[in-house]
Image (cartoon, grey):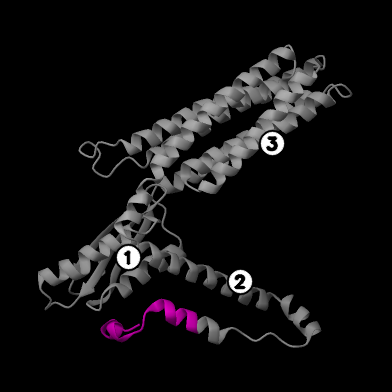
């Protein structure tokens, strides 16, 4: 695209949709031929390309809706963290009740079932993790911007890493205890109907919490959803293992090992996802495309983009963009019509935490 003629071009989104409609290959009428073509790698790549373009266009439309949002809608988006704090507090309260149920189940089995003990330990760590997440969300909402000018949103990432470390240590301990139990050939535990009822009630409650947290979709709620999913699955395995121990003595310690290994693995994956974000990983090509489109279409005064940096310092993106404008424009026009409104527009996007816009009169390749 010629920077000098950029102001004469049509908006990017309608042109992309037009290209997509007009360049999509026609499907062959012969069904047998169609099946053969669908199996070819070439046509799979074409289908994947158009699927990716559809997703990108949907993202463009979502960006447009966010940028056009009123101040009231923008304020509602800022209330998301407050909602996370309420959700964390609710889950924490329910987990305390379920912890008491698991303590009762452990007591009724005489502490002989390692699989039930593993779910009890997981609940203790869950409560610790819920408390940490609630404190992080609470601290973010009540940030003193004189002490933290850019907020404390990275507390979420740090709290997730801390919870992951605690989870890993607790579950590795259960694995070692299970191995000792297998080697010592300990007596199988016995379960009564009250114990089974308590565990089934825990499964149902955790499943409902999993759905609620998953549908919210924020970073904190996704972490809580992982907790609830793990609990519902591990308690199920614990019941099966404890009941199967009547016929096979190794079933209970093996179930405990499987539960702990699964939980430890899932949390290791979550923790590893945080490090690239905390260490400044670049945005994806799709994220670059979304940011570049907003900048290019913002104003006819913009001749081109000299530098565009999109990278993580947490869950969301930091954007640095150098736009090139005509050297004869006044400072007032550059500030009021280009730099300031573009920065506000970029910061309205849900994927962006902070944007920095710099105007220049030439392409000097500054980074």
Q: Is residue 173 above or below residue 227?
A: above
- Which of 222 and 318 lies nearest the eye of the viewer? 222
Left or right placement of residue 316 versus residue 261 in this view: left
State the SS at label 3: helix
Residue named by callout 3: 233
Marking on residue 260: none
- The residues tagged by marks 3 and 2 sit, at their Cα atoms, a distance apart of 34 Å
Circle 2: is it few (<14), some (14-19), or many (20+) Cα within 10 Å?
few
Q: Is residue 343 above or below residue 234?
A: below
Residue named by callout 2: 48
Q: Is residue 185 above or below residue 163?
A: above
* Residue farthest toward the front in the current orientation of the protein: 72
Q: Earlier in the sequence, mark 1 or mark 3?
A: 3
Residue at the image position 50 percent from the left and 30 percent from the top: 129
Residue named by callout 1: 308
Q: Earlier in the sequence, mark 3 or mark 2?
A: 2
Q: Earlier in the sequence, mark 2 or mark 1?
A: 2
Is residue 73 visible in the rendered image? The answer is yes
- Which of 252 and 225 lies nearest the eye of the viewer? 225
* Residue farthest toward the right in the current orientation of the protein: 247
* Quadrant position of residue 339: bottom left
Counting from the top left corner in percent of width and height, residue 290 is at 41, 67
From the image, state whether disc 1 or disc 3 is nearer to you: 3
Residue at the image position 50 percent from the left and 26 percent from the top: 128
């Amino acid at each position: 695209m010629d920077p000098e003629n950029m102001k004469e071009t049509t908006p990017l989104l309608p042109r992309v949709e037009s290209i997509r409609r007009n360049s999509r290959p026609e499907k062959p009428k012969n069904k047998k031929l169609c099946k053969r073509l669908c199996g070819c790698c070439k046509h799979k790549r074409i289908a994947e390309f158009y699927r990716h373009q559809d997703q990108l266009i949907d993202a463009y439309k979502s960006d447009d809706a966010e940028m056009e949002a009123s101040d009231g809608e923008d304020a509602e988006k800022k209330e998301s963290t407050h909602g996370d704090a309420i959700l964390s507090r609710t889950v924490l309260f329910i987990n305390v009740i379920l912890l008491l149920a698991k303590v009762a189940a452990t007591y009724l089995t005489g502490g002989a079932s390692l699989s039930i003990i593993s779910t009890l330990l997981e609940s203790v760590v869950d409560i610790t993790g819920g408390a940490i997440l609630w404190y992080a969300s609470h601290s973010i909402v009540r940030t003193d911007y004189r002490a933290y000018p850019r907020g404390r949103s990275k507390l979420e990432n740090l709290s997730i890493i801390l919870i992951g470390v605690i989870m890993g240590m607790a579950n590795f301990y259960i694995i070692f205890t299970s191995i000792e139990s297998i080697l010592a050939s300990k007596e199988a535990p016995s379960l009564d109907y009250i114990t089974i009822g308590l565990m089934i009630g825990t499964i149902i409650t955790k499943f409902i919490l999993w759905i609620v947290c998953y549908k919210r979709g924020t970073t904190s709620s996704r972490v809580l959803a992982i907790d609830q999913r793990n609990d519902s699955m591990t308690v199920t395995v614990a019941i099966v293992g404890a009941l199967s121990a009547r016929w096979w003595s190794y079933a209970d310690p093996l179930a405990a090992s499987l539960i702990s290994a699964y939980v430890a693995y899932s949390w290791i994956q979550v923790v590893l996802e945080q490090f690239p974000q905390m260490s400044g990983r670049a945005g994806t090509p799709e994220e670059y495309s979304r940011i570049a489109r907003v900048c290019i279409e913002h104003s006819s005064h913009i001749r081109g983009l000299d530098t565009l940096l999109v990278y993580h310092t947490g869950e969301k993106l930091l954007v640095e963009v150098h736009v090139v404008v005509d050297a004869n424009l006044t400072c007032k026009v550059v500030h009021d019509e280009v730099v300031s409104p573009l920065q506000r527009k970029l910061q309205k996007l849900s994927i962006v935490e902070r944007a920095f816009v710099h105007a220049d009169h030439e392409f000097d390749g500054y980074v």
